[in-house]
Image (cartoon, rainbow, N blue to C red):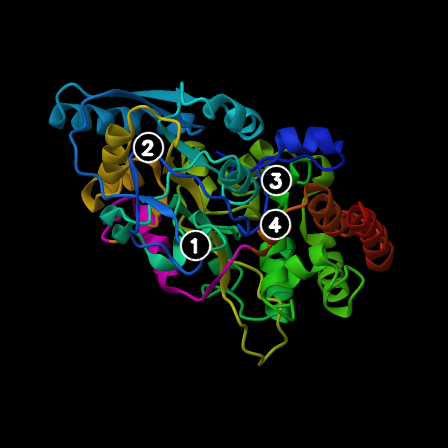
Amino acid sequence: MTEHSRPYGLSRRGLLRAAAVGGTVATAAACAGPGTTRGGRSGAGAPSDVPKPVSGRADARISFAHWRAEDKKVLAELIGDFTARHRGSGVQQDISPAQDYQANALQRLKSGAVGDVLTAFRGAQFADMLKAGLFTELSAQTFADHYMPRHSRGGRDAAGRLFGLPYQLVFLMPLANGDLLEKAGYADPPQDWDGYLDLCDKLKSRGTVPLAWPGAEPGNAGQLFNSMVMNNAPHDDACARIESGKAKVTDDWFLRILGQYAQLRPFVQRKAAGTQVEPAQQMFARGSAAMLATGSYHMAAVRQLDAEFPIALVPPITVAKGERPRYVGTHNATFILGVNAASKHATTALRFVEYLSTPSVATRYANGTAQHLTVTGVTYENKDLRDTQHWLEKRTMLAPRYQIEDIDMLNAVEGACAKVLTGTSPGKAAEAAQRVVDQRRRK
């Protein structure tokens, strides 16, 4: 499974089709579902038409649109239980490949013919769907209280009204082979940049590639950007400031990031720029690479490749020795669940989202799909989820790469990092990226 897939260097049109990128949702869009009423628990901002808490029976056949083919079996089992409890109901999974869903879901779902219950990637896709009025407001639904408040922000509009429920919680930082790190003398992860470089050097001296980086698939390769930014950026919204023109890629803080990317050059695999994510996963799974620079969403994939070693999450901490980092990792809350405002079966759709939001049901989904969730009260029985569960309580930053909503700007900014990692000088890469940002801002 890849959280995102986006090749560098495509045309804007191609990027839009392939992308699953975007920033924090900042778009207000009012959309009222059927049977709405005035009032409810709307957040700060203008009053809205808010559907009342769901109260009717689930007795219709509905469509559930998503992109998680790997979850089909687990969801089918959950759907079986749901329909057994609600006589007359039915849920048909409408599954599209992730890139197709990113490119076509808005057009396919807006009529309501499919996708009574729908999903969205956090960022640009959710913002676009919100603008198009696809989501029914959920602010008054009591099942929304089952979600961790800090992770539900990605499903709100600018006025604070809740339209979607981010279901999955992924940690966007490198996976590490715990055995190899311990043999290199790092049973505990390094806590500063010098330590991280020392770890990489020791791993390399033992004949291991320190960091497998899927440079040919920037959607995954760009996850390293999150860790590199989290403690270097002078402000939490620094990437948003690049997009707005308040900060530049040529600023000192960003040049420092690029300089650190240059220091990582000796520690990625040969021909890294041409490596797809699957070979990078295989390098990590068979122990020829000690770390995989993607995220927790690949734990299940490397287990399927027969990896038996303990997996840890080890982000590069870019601060100087003795300096306290602001953040120890990065996360994203995505797979945003919602109810289609054009659905003719809103009650059944709301009941199904309510069912998925139940802690016991979410527990079955989490362990069956090896995903951490944003639902409170979930019990993690999967060993990898259990071993990394402590990250739910750590001081992690919401992935900064998604602050840049303009896909051409994001491509340029992240592309500068990739170019430096594969040989371009930081100054030259920064100037080229800033030219693209400036061009986009003038349009």
Q: Nearer the viewer, residue 147 or 214?
A: 147
Q: Position of residue 122 (x, y in %)?
A: 50, 44
Q: Position of residue 66 (x, y in %)?
A: 42, 28
Q: Is residue 316 left or right of residue 154?
A: right
Earlier residue among tags 1 and 3: 1
Amino acid type of the residue tagged 1 in the rendering: Arg
Query: Which SS class for mark 1?
Result: helix
Which residue appears farthest toward the bottom when viewing the image? 322
Pointer 4 residue = 211
Specify which label sits upstream in the sequence, 3 or 4: 4
Give the residues drawn in magenta, as a range: 377-399
Residue 219: mark in rendering: 3
Separation of residues labelled 2 and 1 (CA atoms): 24 Å
Other residues around mark 3 within 10 Å, as few (<14) / some (14–19) / many (≥20) = many
Residue denoted by label 1? 153
Query: Measured along the vertical axis of the image, is residue 174 above or below residue 288?
Result: below
Which circle's residue, 3 or 2, is located before the other in the chain?
Answer: 2
Q: Is residue 378 above or below residue 328?
A: above
